[in-house]
Image (cartoon, rainbow, N blue to C red):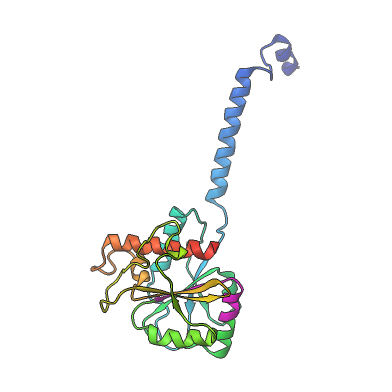
Amino acid sequence: MLRNQLFKQGKLTVKSSKLKVTFGVAMYVFLTFHLFLFASFSVPTYKIAKLKYNGGGDWYANRTAVPNLIAFCNQNLGTNISSVEVNVDVASSDLFNYPFVYLTGHGNVVFSDQEAKNLRKYLIGGGFLHIDDNYGLNQFIRPQMKKVFPELDFVELPPQHPIYHQKFDFPQGLPKIHEHDGKHPQGFALVYKGKVVCFYTYECDLGNGWEDFGTYPEDSQQNRDKALKMGANLVQFALTQ
């Protein structure tokens, strides 16, 4: 009754331009708030895992590296990667849940035949492996990756390769992050049917740069920024190539 009286008296009219504007603003605020609320509590789209291998090497090295890289990617790439780092065994079927897997360490790496087979299946099926030499890994990882892809050899990617020109531009190619032997940093890839399935950073030590600032006093904030930007390029490349 009251609603009808208001209509009759002209005190309330849905045709009023003022009411239309008010309604539009209110609806905009309502939708914006709920979209923000939904985004704040949305389920992460991706997870990044650290590869757990046998042989005695410290697969668990660079403990703060991956969480820091994830935070950087979410902030700068607009990704929605889970902030929780996951450890996954080479032979596990869970490997296939992660589009990007990180392997690092200083020492021995051993893949069994079953592990090599599982890793090959993962990489051929669309997965991406980033191997980061934490110093001393080179002599061990190369023969193990040969088990995974006997028909492939690591090839050095030139500075012009798209992996260095994603969100962040690296005209000179892979940046030098942590000094060991004074050698030039190199980025190698295993390319299967035209697709980079594995990227190997040698004499660069990106993971050291991803760690909490101050972990390595000799590493500057400038180098840390370079490391995070290059890491973000790897994630972007892996998810979009």
Q: Where is residue 77 in the image (x, y as percent from the top left)?
A: 47, 55
**Quick one: which residue is furthest to the left in this view?**
218
Up-down: is 5 above or below 85? above
For the point 42% across and 58% down, the residue is 72
For the point 55% across and 39% down, the residue is 33
- Residue 28 lies in the magenta stretch: no
Quadrant location of residue 208? bottom left
Query: Closest to the observer: 19 or 193?
Result: 193
Q: Position of residue 68 (x, y in %)?
A: 40, 62
Say if residue 211 shows up in the picture: no
Q: Where is residue 136 in the image (x, y as percent from the top left)?
A: 34, 83
For the point 63% across and 23% down, the residue is 20
Up-down: is 19 above or below 206? above
Query: What segment carries the magenta color?
Result: 119-132
Horizontal arrangement in the rendering, residue 9 relative to residue 89 (left or right): right
For the point 34% across and 62% down, the residue is 226
Q: Position of residue 154 (x, y in %)?
A: 46, 80
**Total numbered labels placed on residues in the image:** 0
Quadrant containing the C terminus in the rendered view: bottom right
Say if residue 62 shows up in the picture: yes
Quadrant containing the N terminus in the rendered view: top right
Query: Closest to the observer: 107 or 189?
Result: 189
Quadrant location of residue 193? bottom right
Horizontal arrangement in the rendering, residue 227 relative to residue 143 (left or right): left
Query: Closest to the observer: 165 or 203?
Result: 165
